Image (cartoon, rainbow, N blue to C red):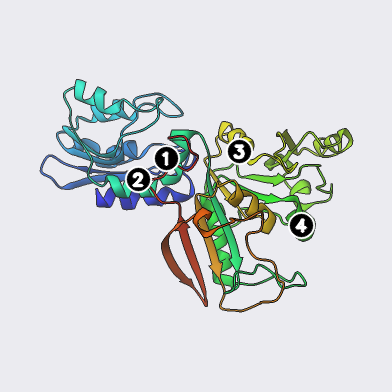
Amino acid sequence: MGRALELAARGRYGASPNPMVGAVVLDAEGRLAGEGWHAAFGGPHAEVVALDDAGGSARGGTLYVTLEPCAHRGKTPPCVDAILEAGVRRVVLALRDPTATASGGSERLRAEGIEVHEGPGADQARILNRRWLRWARHKRPWVTMKAAVSLDGRVATREGHSQWITGEAARERGLELREEHDAILVGVGTVLADNPRLTRRLGLNPVTGWRRIVLDSRLRVPSNAALVQSEPQATLIAHTPQATGENRRRLGDLGVELVEITADDTGRVDLDALLDELARREVSTLLVEGGPTVHGSFADTDLVDEAIFFVAPILIGGEAPAAVAGRGAPTLEMARRLRFETVRHHGEDLEITAVRPGDEDVHGVD
């Protein structure tokens, strides 16, 4: 199962909105016969890849898989059918599939006389697929807040200089995060100030369908913005009813997708409603790379599941902007407490990851 989990992690850049799944096949004598992982959404599942790799050696053997084999026909045939056809005698799975659509594989395998064991590696499988599990169970995207900051938490100098706070290695890792997520989100302020492209450009993710999302209540994004001029069909601008018909026509005619979302009590796009809309579009993981205002809005509404901060060993000080603005917490007791998970070096900089404690429901559904 440990090997299956290692294989599953190889799908980090292409599996979403499916889960990352790995599989290992042992022959009837307990020798390694085949292995595989789910590499890309729409492609073959891990079990099928591993069984194909094993060939006839799978008959009478054991399949280890990190998630319950699916029993439904989606973009690919049911994995249960492939397992039965291969003649596997025993299946060991880490996690049950929590979705109504794909679950039921264990019951069907048992009904066909296959020995099924559940549980080994469950904790590791949960951590590996926590982003997908959040979306699968509650139909809300997993929200990752990403920022590059100084040692004192500033994202720019008092005069607005921000390129570059961190070094090249940290910036490269930041681009990797785009490959891991289904969509990126910024506010219109970032578009007006930096004119970003918001592209995937490392070539790690084999799946098309990358989305660029802009929060723009009144549709102030200019027609010559980079994310309008290049692949406008990949850009979704979320606005409120305040947007004028003229601006709707202007951006719509350029091929940008416009989505009207109700306004919150500040007149901005209601983030809860936006996340619901993105979930319907199969956005299971959302990378928030906005400025302090956007970060503050997500923090104030308690919608941050994971925070990844790249910290440079510099002190900016003064009246420079912090990474997270918004209303903020009135007391320390009311501040959202995350759990430090990893610290990694990238050149001179640090990547610090903190996540919402795993025993809590992120969106108050449980």
| Disc marking residue 272 | 3
Assess whether mark 3 and mark 2 are in contact (beta carbons under 8 angstroms): no
Q: What residue did someone put label 1 on?
A: 133
Q: Secondary structure at mark 4?
A: loop
Q: CA distance from mark 2 to mark 1?
A: 8 Å
Q: Amino acid at mark 1?
A: Leu
Assess whether mark 3 and mark 1 are in contact (beta carbons under 8 angstroms): no
Residue 299 rendering spot, x and y as whole percentages: 59, 52
Residue found at x 77% / y 46% = 228
Q: What residue did someone put label 2 on?
A: 126
In the displayed structure, does residue 286 sit left or right of residue 234? Answer: left
Q: Amino acid at mark 4?
A: Asn
Assess whether mark 4 and mark 1 are in contact (beta carbons under 8 angstroms): no
Question: Within 10 Å of the Cα at label 3, are there few (<14), some (14-19), or many (20+) other Cα atoms?
Answer: some
| Disc marking residue 195 | 4
Q: CA distance from mark 4 to mark 2?
A: 38 Å
Residue found at x 48% / y 50% = 13
Assess whether mark 1 and mark 2 are in contact (beta carbons under 8 angstroms): yes
Q: Is residue 221 above or below residue 282?
A: below
Q: Amino acid at mark 3?
A: Asp
